[in-house]
Image: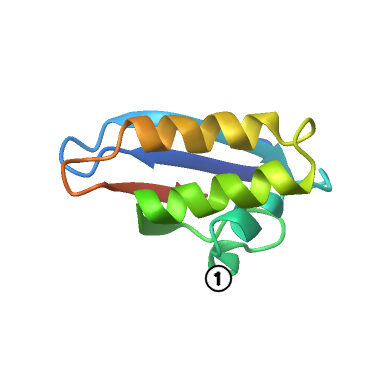
Amino acid sequence: KNMGHEIYAIETATRKDVAYLNRSTFNKLNCEIYNALKSQECNGGASGLNIEKKFTISDLNGALDYLNLTNKEALEPEIDFINRCIKNCDNNGEICILFY
């Protein structure tokens, strides 16, 4: 298994995977998803810390704003990931994201 950041979004009710993001340990952009989601406590440096966290549509829209202002072209994978999260939020406007 490669060292890196594997991040999954799962539906809150069904626990079905709906989005996936992977950045290698040595990729300089691997911290940007944590910055965007204000979740530095989930970042273990070489990988995520096996933490699951719930996010609201408001959190996700804030993350999109951050990503779009930062380095839009280089962060397309993160932007796609967040857009998929928004599309798959539950009736309460929430989604779970796992940081591995």
The residue shown at (18%, 49%) is 92
Q: Is residue 88 above or below residue 49?
A: above
Where does the image place residue 43, in percent across and percent down from the top left? Answer: 61, 62
Q: Is residue 84 above or below residue 37?
A: above
Q: What is the quadrant of the N terminus in the image?
A: top right
Other residues around mark 1 within 10 Å, as few (<14) / some (14–19) / many (≥20)? few
Query: 36 and 29: which one is in front?
Result: 36
Where does the image place residue 93, in percent across and percent down from the top left? Answer: 25, 47
Left or right side of 29 for 79: left
Q: The residue under label 1 is which amino acid type?
A: Glu
Q: Is residue 68 visible?
A: yes
The residue shown at (68%, 42%) is 68
Left or right side of 78 for 96: left
Where does the image place residue 40, in percent across and percent down from the top left? Answer: 60, 67
Q: Where is mark 1, residue-wise?
A: 41
Q: How many marks?
A: 1
Where does the image place residue 27, in percent across and percent down from the top left? Answer: 81, 43
Q: Is residue 7 above or below residue 37?
A: above
Give the SS element for disc 1: helix
